[in-house]
Amino acid sequence: MLKDNLIMLRKLHGYSQEQIAEKIGISRQAYAKWERGLTIPDIEKAAALAKVYGITIDGLMKTETIDGIGMLPPAPPGKHIWGTVTIGDRGQIVIPKSARDEFDLKGGDRLIVASDEVGIALFPTSFFEDKMQQFMGLLTEKPE
């Protein structure tokens, strides 16, 4: 819900109600009413809030939860948390349908598995192959 996102985002960014109200040109009392769910911002103020937090207006309005984790903060544009998966006995996972739809993934598609010390990422082999060809092209270019 909007009021929950407003509270979470403000706290995540370390702002007081007064600081946020000042950034978008309203009184602290008006902002406090939004956080209590007594009123809601008009579209211009919602856009200003989204800009301050680096998210979309849609992200500001929607609340997402994940079982066992709870409510998630709105993600920046182009960033997603698709949910949780369970690793099978042989290491297999099922990619959530919404993520498969977003990236047009189908059975039999090949993905590259990459990681850092924090986690694992998957991306299409075609993306990796294209980047490798670009890189190899740079290596074979003759200096002027």
Image: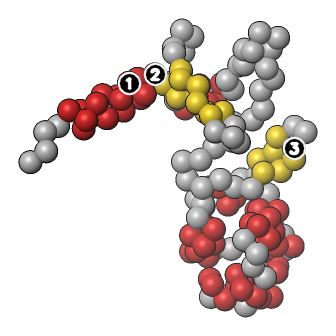
| Residue type at tag 2 | Thr
Badge 3 or badge 2: first in the primary sequence: 3
User: Which quadrant is home to the N terminus?
Assistant: bottom right
Reading the image, the residue beneath label 2 is 125
Dot 2 falls on a residue whose secondary structure is helix
Foreground pick, 87 / 41: 87
In the structure shown, which secondary structural element does the residue marked by tag 1 occupy? helix
Residue 77 in percent (x, y) is at 55, 53
What is the number of the mark on residue 69? 3
Drawn side of residue 108 relative to residue 42, left or right: left
In this rendering, the label closer to the viewer, 3 or 1:
1
- Residue 51: which quarter of the image? bottom right
Tag 3 secondary structure? loop
> 10 Å neighbourhood of mark 1: few (<14), some, or many (≥20)?
few
Instruction: Give x and y (percent) for residue 16.
Output: 78, 82
- Give whichever of 34, 119 is nearer the camera: 119
As measured in the structure, the alpha-carbon distance from the residue carrying label 3 to the one carrying label 1 is 36 Å
